[in-house]
Amino acid sequence: MDIWDILHGALRMATPIGLAALGGVFTHRAGVLNIAIEGMMLISAFVGVITSYATGSVTAALLAAIAVSVVIGLIFSFFGVTLQGNIIITGLAVNIFALGITSFILQSAFGMRGSLSSPKIVGLKPVDMPWLGGVPVIGPILNNQTPIVYAGLLISIIVSIVLYKTKFGLYVRVVGENEDAARSMGIRVSSIKYGAVAISAVLSALAGVNLSLENLTMFVENMTSGRGFIALAAIFCGQGTPGGAYTFSFLFGLADAVQMRLQGFNVPGAFIQMIPYLFIVVILGVAGIMRNRGNTQRGIRND
Amino acid sequence: MKTETMRWAKRLAAPLIPVFLAFLVGAIFLIFSGHNPLEAYGALFEGALIGKSNLLNTLFSATPLMFTGIATAVAFRANIFNMGVEGQLYLGAFAAAYVGFTFHGLPPVVHVSLCLLAALAAGALYALIPGLLKGFLNANEMVVTIMLNYVATLLTGYLASYPFKAKGVGFAATDLIEKSAELPRFSKMTQLNYSFVIALVVVLLAYVLFKKTKLGYEIDAIGKNGNFAEAVGMNVAKKTVLIMIISGMIASLAGAGEVLGVHHRFISDFSPGYGWDGLTIALLGSNHPAGVLVAALFFGMLKNGGSSMELVVGVPRSLIDVIQGLIIFFLAVDFIAKRFGLFQTILARFRNA
């Protein structure tokens, strides 16, 4: 059935966005506008590929990607939280730096320009679980996905639990809602923010590795192509809840899957490729209209 | 007198320290990748500054950056993060090319003006979308503009590959524009052309906008405190739309300048990220027109010198992007120091009142 194929694809396309968005939920709730997700994903995708290339081990690739991403996250926090730099600009710095450093290393260490592919790169393969494939409805969607896709689903549940049922989650929410109150309660605001950014870095790393070692087994310059920002859109549309963020990630993934499915038809490819991007713009607009309902204030501007 | 000197010293140090630190960290990367930083930087500056043609080419490389820098700065001053300069640039470029190859037999001045007007209209319309979404629906303008960048590249890429594709050209590009629509070069030895003059005029106009007009004052007021601006009776939503449109129009000129002055046709994906460079340049120039001009010239130098660095000592040009990212890191910190200062002066004023 075609529809199951599309939904299967949607889940696959949604995973990098969803993982990045789940991590971003923590920073969002801690009051840190983290646009560095994009850069952390890109660097992780790159580190994953070169580690897999060098060692042939996917585990090593995953660990290296997470480690580097966390270091980037720490630098981001140091500039943005400790030194109180403008958080948007610090995030921008991470993104531009990520673009530069990945292509710099690609060129100076591998002599490649644009992309790195090699049979030596070991990727993660889809897992076939016949018992799961037999289950109606969810079977065809869930079976034959790659490991990080499953991890993503599991993590969406874990993130909800951590955010709503643990002390850390509570602190994150308090810090985001009222920093002064949090401080007066004795919460170490900076540590909480560092923690939120670190979680976001780990999940962005998974998202990056999903792109470079599961969807493809290669690295392409700027291969994240705005997925970090799409994840931000998912967070905004989902109003900062893990469930909402993942749901919108799935919708955006669905738009992407539909786009890929439509490519055989007699419509110019460019217009079809626009679907996910336009969809996000429309959704953000609709979310704005919903927010403004019943609000008679003129020119709302709350940041 | 003394405080005045101090202020100037601070103003100069604010961008110089990040640049210096970025080059320093860049040198570490160079050492790790087995290059000699002095040699690399030497080749960079030599390729950018020594000799008349190198110097002129640096100005040439700086031209689109002046436009995108000012475009970004106009929005940044109002605390609007227009990251859609790249997309607005593409639509402006295509509109200019379309008028350039469609009309025939016009006097050059008229034809060029028409091309520029078409670009301005395209840029304004395209910036209207995020402007409205931000102003009236408070949708995050960063996400919206970045999404629209992809749409713009896809759309113009399609137009240049199918309906307007030039015959007998092996890549996605439109027909050449008429001779009457071209912005002439200054001399044969360089690609520097009259779009540089237009860029200078834009810088000057931006200066007038910020220093002499009510709108400029309002932009700064919104940037410092949007809610306060709203409270004292400014229609922030409408102004947000207007600011976005102005920003988009300036961005469109960057595209038009490249089409009319350099490529003489629209080429799909021709921009190597001029819009993104504009962000760095606006930040480095503290969103001040003169600062943006200097920062654009500086980046023109890096871009131009970067190519010869790659040729002469084999250091990848992407080092420039690394340095760019590092500069923004170090700038972010200064940036807040300034904003903090502002915040405190406002508080102090309230206390005194």
Image (tube, grey):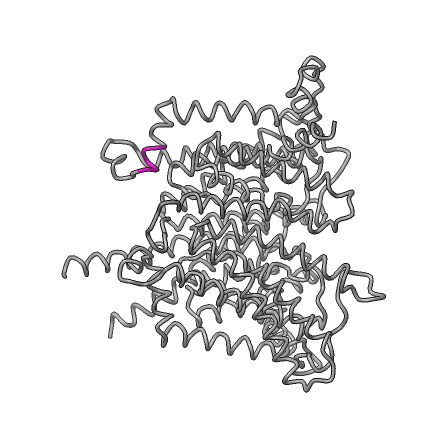
**Farthest residue, direction right:** B168
The image shows a total of numbered marks equal to 0
State the image coordinates of residue A2 (x, y, percent, origin top left). 73, 30
> Which is more toward the observer, B86 or B341?
B86
Q: Residue at x 59, y 64 (%)?
A: B89
Residue B120's quadrant in the figure? Answer: bottom right
**Farthest residue, direction bottom:** B107
State the image coordinates of residue B47 (x, y, percent, origin top left). 63, 69
A159 left or right of B33 in image: left
A24 left or right of A220 in image: left
**Farthest residue, direction left:** B352
> Which is more toward the observer, B312 or B164?
B164
State the image coordinates of residue A290 (x, y, percent, origin top left). 43, 43
| Residue A193 in sight here | yes
Q: Residue at x 46, y 41 (%)?
A: A236
Residue A205, above or below B347: above
Residue B39's quadrant in the figure? Answer: bottom right
| Residue A67 in sight here | no
Residue A20, above or below B49: above
> Which is more toward the observer, B197 or B34?
B197
B99 left or right of B334 in image: right
State the image coordinates of residue A160 (x, y, percent, origin top left). 45, 25
> Which is more toward the observer, A14 or B336?
A14
Quarter of the rendering occupied by the N terminus of chain A: top right
Q: Residue at x 58, y 42 (%)?
A: A227
Q: Is residue A68 magenta?
A: no
The span picked out in magenta is A173-177
**Secondary structure mostly seen in the magenta stretch:** helix
